[in-house]
Image: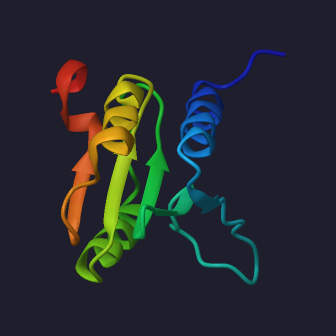
């Protein structure tokens, strides 16, 4: 069975987070959880980060956008990344994250502009 493109992106994000010794978890939404929570909730170099993984031209849902905005408005960093933005995510992890309250949408950069 072929792996879905978004699953491949998520696996690569996990590899990057592990490489940079970030604390992270993948929230499970169920009857007791909240919908729209980013795919990864992380603490990277002392910063709260929400990472939403997408494949290709996939965009966050309205509820995902709201959660990412809530993270940003609370002083965290919100990131949307697809397979074309993995190198950018690696660069951010190496160089530094955007300022608190910032969003960094990898879907709006480069190939998908």
Q: In this view, does 31 lie to the left or right of 42?
A: right
Query: Residue reaching furthest left?
Result: 113
Which one is in front, 60 or 99? 99
Q: Is residue 78 left or right of residue 51?
A: left
Q: Against 27, is 9 above or below?
A: above
Q: Against 89, is 57 above or below?
A: above
Residue 113: x percent and y percent? 15, 27
Which one is in front, 73 or 44? 44
Q: Quadrant of residue 91?
A: top left
**Quarter of the N terminus within the rendering:** top right
Residue 102: x percent and y percent? 20, 63
Q: In this view, does 71 lie to the left or right of 112?
A: right
Query: Residue reaching furthest right?
Result: 1
Q: Is residue 45 left or right of residue 40?
A: left
The residue positioned 65% from the left and 33% from the top of the image is 11
The residue positioned 39% from the left and 39% from the top of the image is 81
């Amino acid at each position: 069975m072929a792996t879905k493109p978004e699953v491949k992106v998520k696996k690569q994000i996990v590899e990057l987070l592990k490489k940079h010794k970030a604390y992270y978890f993948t929230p499970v939404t169920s009857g007791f959880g909240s919908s729209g929570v980013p795919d990864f909730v992380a603490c990277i170099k002392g910063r709260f980060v929400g990472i939403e993984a997408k494949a290709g031209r996939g965009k966050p849902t309205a509820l995902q956008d709201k959660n990412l905005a809530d993270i940003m408005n609370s002083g965290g960093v919100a990131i949307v990344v697809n397979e074309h933005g993995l190198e950018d995510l690696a660069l951010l992890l190496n160089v530094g994250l955007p300022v608190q309250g910032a969003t960094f949408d990898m879907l709006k950069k480069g190939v998908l502009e």
